[in-house]
Amino acid sequence: VHMAMITDLVVLLVALLHGYFLILEMFLWDKPMGLKVFGHSKEQAATTKVLASNQGLYNGFIAVGLLVGIFQGAAGYDFKLYFLACVVVAGIYGAATANRKILFVQALPGAIGLLLVLFANH
């Protein structure tokens, strides 16, 4: 299997993860699934719903940026690099400030994608 195809599949996985994060944060935050995933109470969810929705929207922007990078082929290299770097930084920040699990759920897949993009193009 061609390295570029494997790379794009990993980048697609990261994009899909961020699409999933958008759904969780924008639409399911105060629903049973969101409460379970994030481990907060209905009261906490109610007071943070607007913030979570905004956060979800930004995750959507990341997902779209990664998809643009994939669909542009070789011309999408800079898109992939930029948005994967954003994923890694956001994941590290989230792990340091919110929940250590974010390091593995967000930062690690982003870092793997970033390394693959860097090495697949050199």
Image: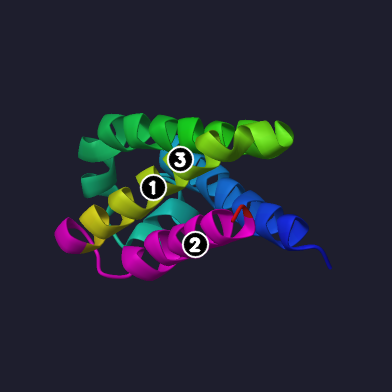
Q: Name the residue under label 2.
A: 115
Task: Say which residue appears at 41% left-offset and 42% top-offset.
Answer: 25
Is 89 above or below relative to 63?
below
Q: What element carries label 3?
A: helix
- How far separated are the C-alphas under marks 1 and 3? 5 Å
State if disc 3 and disc 1 touch (CB < 8 Å): yes
Which one is nearer the viewer's eye here, 72 or 96? 72
Q: Residues within 10 Å of mark 1 (few under 14, many from 20)?
A: some
Q: Residues within 10 Å of mark 2 (few under 14, many from 20)?
A: some
Q: How many labels does the image show?
A: 3
The answer, for residue 28, to whether it is visible in the render is no
Task: Say which residue appears at 53% left-offset and 34% top-offset.
Answer: 79
- How far separated are the C-alphas under marks 3 and 2? 13 Å
The amino acid type of the residue labelled 3 equals Phe
Q: Specify the segment rendered in magenta.
A: 96-120
Is 60 above or below relative to 104?
above
Q: Which of marks 1 and 2 is nearer the N terminus?
A: 1
Task: Say which residue appears at 26% left-offset and 59% top-offset.
Answer: 92
Q: Mark 1 points at which residue?
A: 85
Is residue 76 shown left or right of residue 73? Answer: left
Q: Mark 3 points at which residue?
A: 83
- Quarter-wise, where is residue 36 in the image? bottom left
Q: Is mark 2 on a helix, strand or loop?
A: helix
State the image coordinates of residue 65 (x, y, percent, origin top left): 54, 32
State the image coordinates of residue 41 (x, y, percent, origin top left): 26, 55
Of the 4 image quadrants, the one containing the N terminus is bottom right
